[in-house]
Amino acid sequence: MELIIDLPVYAPVLKKLQALDGITVRVLAEPADNARERPVSEIENGALLLCTIPPVNHTAMKKLELVQIASAGYTQLIGQGFAERNVRCCNALGVFDVPIAEWNIAMMINLARDFRGMLHNQQQKIWDRSARFQDEIRGRVVGIWGYGGIGRETARLAKTLGMTVHVLSRSGVKPRKSAYCVPGTGDPEGLLPDRVFGMHEKEAFLRSADFLIMAIPQTGATVGIVGEEELRSLKPTAFLLNPARGPLVKEAALIRALKEHWFAGAALDTHYHYPMPPEHPLWEMENVILTPHISGSSASPYFLERVWDIFFENVQRFRDRQPLLNELSAAALTGS
């Protein structure tokens, strides 16, 4: 069985793959970050493919049975005919759970203690020991909208800090058996939330939260899922955190809400424009922390290690006919 690697090498796992019986590994030169054609002679015998995006001419891979991509998003797989060819596909969900959850914790503390205001005072040489700089997040309610890997690791860290965890989920909270999770992190059994709300309880969920964290993927059904009604449901003292996708929250409603102080403020790592134009009003708002989509990215020092870990595990599971990690459904691959 030949493995095709179209990704930068993580040597420790490459050596483990090369040591597996019945496996040959071909590492392609100059791994691709975007779609391109590969010489047929390089890829035609590949049964398993590790890549960021499949080659344009992947149909030449007549023996292909499994594609493992290096991102949680999988739009590069949709409509490519993999489901029709019975090619199984897996994403890299879980690779960024740890850094994004840590960003969530950092932002909650920064918002609660108005760290932005403290930095402003430092720059202006202002000595101000006001109570607003001395708050705590212990005892606060963190409302996590969605309970995938990022939500579960955020919940674990929040519980350690003495917070109460509320979750809003369409399908409830269940154990996750076939999703990648960094060892020792997350909530694989789904036992940590203090309360789980169904979508029919959305208003009660929003009103309960001191911090609302968006932790759902962007799909056709979730774009604009947070609008004026949802933002007005937040407490005046609550904060919004969005490390998921900017368009989950309606842009005009968010700007108005922050300008008019419907709630206390926001930390935003995902945005409506890349890069955010300098004239955008969010830059100037004193109740907003903006970060440039760095809560989790391929620049992380652990990105390659974790992607290769998923692939190594899936190679073994595929060979042993066990359930794969992060396998995408046929419906997902066809965009339905």
Image (cartoon, helix red, strand yellow):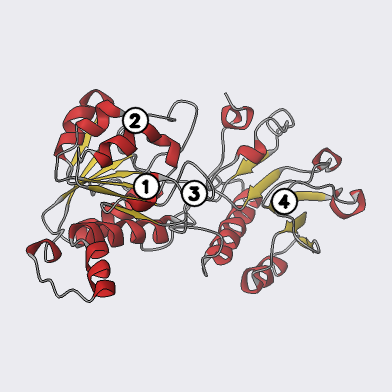
Q: Secondary structure at mark 1?
A: helix
- State left or right for residue 117 relative to residue 290: left
What's under tag 3, amino acid-wise?
Met
Classify the position of the N terminus by image quarter.
Answer: bottom right
Task: Give the foreground label among 1 and 2.
Answer: 1
Mark 2 → mark 4, Cα distance in angstroms: 32 Å
Q: Residue at x 69, y 30 (%)?
A: 79
- In the image shown, does 29 or 133 lie closer to the viewer? 133
Which numbered dot is residue 171? 2
- In the image shown, does 57 or 113 lie closer to the viewer? 113
Residue 169: which quarter of the image? top left
Which numbered dot is residue 282? 1
Q: Position of residue 313 (x, y in %)?
A: 57, 57
What's under tag 1, amino acid-wise?
Leu
Which numbered dot is residue 276? 3
Q: Secondary structure at mark 2?
A: loop
Task: Give the foreground label among 1 and 4.
Answer: 1
Q: Which residue is situated farthest in the left direction here?
A: 131
Q: Which residue is mark 4?
A: 49
Q: Secondary structure at mark 3?
A: loop
Residue 160: which quarter of the image? bottom left
Mark 4 → mark 3, Cα distance in angstroms: 35 Å
Of the numbered discs 3 and 2, the one sitting upstream in the chain is 2
Mark 3 → mark 2, Cα distance in angstroms: 34 Å
